[in-house]
């Protein structure tokens, strides 16, 4: 790996008023003709280039960098002269670029770039395999029956409250919006302790989203006492949340956590594809039951 990624808030150079950073997914405000104000911008992972390296690039470096990220399949097979011709810079500029990102020269850069590509492709294939395995299980009769039973509980509810934190919190937001868009009243709560302050009754249903199933343990007894029903969507059934729920949907995928530099804790990167599938299927089934 040639560099480490970090979240950052700093000024970064541009070329012809275009900021050449990979996959920025938040709005960027133009601060001047030569630089953008990057305030708490999150970058998608691109291991080959660190934030420090990007910030040190000059205009010629960004010409080379931009060509590389737009043509990743070509780079391992190009000569230094071919890349120089494509980017309209000198071979010396390309050598300096390679050294800025920690390589001895362009040849070493190509080898490491190819290695990074191969690792990324393997990770993508692994993610596809995980999703395919889940969908194969989802076709089974027992799983579909469980979805039908859960959908009936939701259809009978007066109000659905979706609860989650972190990535699961994003799923809770999505679920609330998806159910609402199909005509079922649903809200999301991003702080589990707020959930106990919502007036509930036997026709209220909580959907708890948690990969580990070890969250919300202080909140659950209070919700149970209110006679509201609890549905949980977890990675397995062998956890406290699943066991206390009236209905549990488990998706059984490999749990993934990554250590991100500049953070002192692990980031849960477990795929949420199965959860999205279950949200959409349940909402559509509820819609059919309500008609």
Image: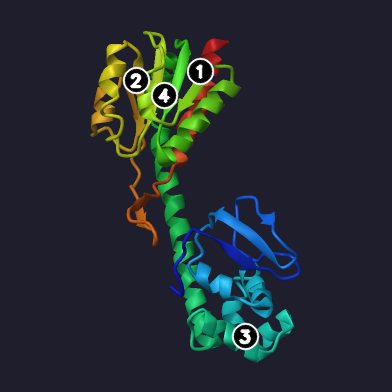
Residues 1 and 166: in front is 166
SS category of the residue bearing label 3:
helix
Q: Residues within 10 Å of mark 2 (few under 14, many from 20)?
A: many
Image spot of residue 48 (x, y percent): 50, 71
From the viewer's perspective, is the residue at label 3 or at label 4 nearer? 3
Quarter of the picture containing the C terminus is top right
Give the residue furthest to the front: 32
First in sequence: mark 2 or mark 4?
A: 4
How far apart marks 3 and 4 lie (CA) works out to 57 Å
The residue that appears at 41% across and 26% down in the rendered structure is 144
Quickly name the residue at label 4: 147
Which of the two labelled residues, at mark 3 and mark 1, occupies the earlier sequence position? 3
What whole-number distance in Å separates the C-alpha atoms at marks 1 and 2? 16 Å
Q: Is residue 49 visible?
A: no
Which of the marked residues, 4 or 1, is nearer the chain's N terminus? 4
Dot in front, 1 or 2: 2
């Amino acid at each position: 790996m040639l560099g480490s990624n970090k979240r950052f808030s700093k000024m970064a150079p541009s070329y012809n008023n275009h900021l050449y950073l990979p996959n920025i997914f938040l709005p960027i405000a133009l601060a001047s003709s030569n630089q953008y104000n990057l305030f708490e911008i999150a970058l998608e992972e691109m291991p080959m280039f660190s934030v420090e390296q990007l910030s040190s690039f000059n205009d010629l470096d960004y010409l080379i960098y931009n060509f590389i990220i737009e043509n990743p399949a070509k780079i391992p097979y190009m000569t230094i002269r071919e890349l120089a011709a494509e980017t309209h810079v000198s071979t010396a500029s390309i050598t300096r670029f390679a050294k800025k990102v920690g390589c001895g020269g362009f040849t070493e850069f190509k080898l490491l770039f190819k290695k990074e590509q191969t690792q990324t492709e393997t990770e993508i294939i692994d993610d596809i395999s995980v999703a395919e395995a889940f969908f194969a299980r989802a076709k089974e009769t027992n799983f579909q029956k469980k979805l039908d039973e859960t959908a009936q509980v939701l259809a009978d509810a007066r109000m659905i409250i979706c609860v989650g934190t972190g990535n699961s919190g994003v799923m809770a937001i999505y679920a609330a919006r998806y159910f609402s868009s199909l005509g079922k009243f649903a809200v999301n709560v991003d702080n589990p302790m707020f959930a106990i302050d919502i007036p509930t009754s036997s026709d209220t249903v909580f959907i708890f989203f948690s990969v580990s199933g070890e969250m919300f343990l202080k909140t659950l007894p209070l919700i149970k006492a209110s006679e509201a029903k609890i549905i949980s969507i977890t990675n397995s059934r062998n956890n406290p949340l699943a066991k206390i729920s009236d209905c549990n949907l488990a998706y059984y995928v490999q749990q993934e956590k990554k250590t991100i530099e500049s953070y002192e804790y692990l980031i849960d990167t477990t795929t949420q594809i199965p959860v999205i599938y279950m949200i959409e299927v349940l909402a559509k089934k509820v819609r059919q039951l309500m008609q």
